[in-house]
Image: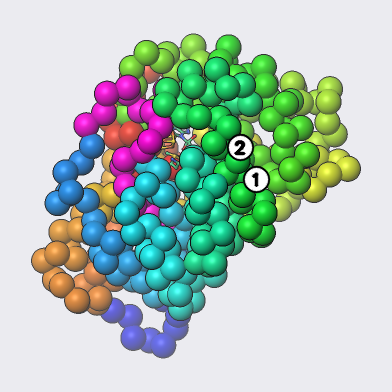
Amino acid sequence: MDNSGKSPQLIDRFGRKVDYLRISITDRCDFRCVYCMSEEMTFLPREQVLSLEEIYTLAKAFAELGVKKIRITGGEPLVRRGALELLENIGQIENLNELVLTTNGSQLEHMALALKKAGIKRINISLDTLDADKFKAITRTGNLQQVLRGIDAANDAGFERIKINAVILKDKNHQEVVDLVQFAVDKAIDISFIEEMPLGMVSQHDRSAAYYSSDCIKADLASHFSLLASTEKTGGPSVYYKVQGSQTRVGFISPHSANFCSSCNRVRLTVEGRLLLCLGNEHSVDLKQVIRANPGDMDILKQTIVDAMQIKPEKHEFNIHEQPVILRHMSVTGG
Ligand code: SAM
Ligand code: SF4
């Protein structure tokens, strides 16, 4: 390891500094969103999944290498037993500025306050529609009212920021973009629209036909809201606009129509302990193997992470009109 006394940093071949880690803490979920999973899913056996202790050790190693922000995601992170304690422990890691969470909202009604106390500052909640039947059609097993109660509980708990994530699908929910922004304005929270990405094989859903670009969404919003371009960044791939006359920011995550790779500062840790250098490529390093072969050896672990930066690809290779090249589902990868 570098003992030069300088703070360690993770830098890739293209000079990009990596200071943001997303961790998928489970591939399991209580929903089966059509763009994310097939109706019948086989989940990973327990021994293939990182233990909570292993996840904590990895989070600590990354923080010691200059990572400032960690997002906990999944699958549905809040269905993993022990998730709250894990979050509490990661929240206390030195030098980590921000611990954030992405959730489908199903557990927030009873967990929001405890999450706030655990040190979570910002929370992203997925909500693609305000129509109960469409919600059922998209999530297959979800209950809209439960999620709406969860959003209210999160608002009451007093997080610094709450953001809705909505994947927009043509002819499924694209007609609702105005209503979704109005919902965010009424609740004084933010919202990001996400273009669907071709990750993993999904059944009963045609990704090419469902593609709806960020530009189309912006055009739909233009007649109802004044969107003011904002230079604000939250460390992720969203490009933000402020809704005039409100506290709400509208973000667009546009992997297809506006490639964001040149400013990529992120890597992902899959639930199997694979360090994934890019969401849209398979370049990865098996950190579970390193941690299990060298228990307690932080130096080897950190050196492996530093070396891994050399294989971070320049950009993703998504093509929504072809069969997915990336066979892992977003739930394994951590969205
Ligand atoms: N279960 C949690 C949730 O739904 O928020 C966290 C994990 S989920 C994989 C994280 C985010 O990825 C969600 O906002 C979801 O809508 C998004 N997502 C899942 N599959 C996607 C896909 N194929 N393309 C784009 N976004 C996707
Ligand atoms: Fe579950 Fe989130 Fe995937 Fe929906 S998007 S199936 S809630 S992991």
| Residue 13 visible to the viewer | no
Please tell me which residue lies in front, 141 or 77. Answer: 141
Q: Is label 2 in a helix, a strand or a loop?
A: helix
Query: Percent position (x, y) of residue 144?
Result: 55, 30
Q: Is residue 94 magenta?
A: no
Please tell me which residue lies in front, 146 or 104. Answer: 146
Give the residues drawn in magenta, as a range.
Answer: 20-42
- Give residue 292's mark: none
Q: Is label 1 in a helix, a strand or a loop?
A: helix
Q: What amino acid is found at the position of numbered circle 1 in the picture?
A: Asp
- Position of the C terminus, as image quadrant, is top left
Q: Is mark 1 within 8 Å of ligand 1?
A: no
Q: Is residue 38 magenta?
A: yes
What residue is shown at x 74% (from left), y 43% (from top)?
A: 187
In 3D space, how far apart are the residues under numbered discs 2 and 1 (Cα atoms)?
Answer: 6 Å
76 to the left or right of 53:
right
| Residue 44 visible to the viewer | yes
Q: Is residue 276 above or below residue 98?
A: above
15 to the left or right of 289:
right
- Position of the N terminus, as image quadrant, is bottom left
Kindly report the secondary structure that dominates the magenta region of the rendered protein. loop
The residue that label 1 is drawn on is 152
Image quarter of residue 62: bottom left
Please tell me which residue lies in front, 92 or 201. Answer: 92
Q: Is residue 91 above or below residue 204?
A: below
Image quarter of residue 182: top right
283 to the left or right of 93:
left
Within 10 Å of disc 1 (Cα), the crowding (few <14, some 14-19, many 20+) is some
- Give residue 148's mark: 2
What residue is shown at x 38% (from left), y 28% (from top)?
A: 32
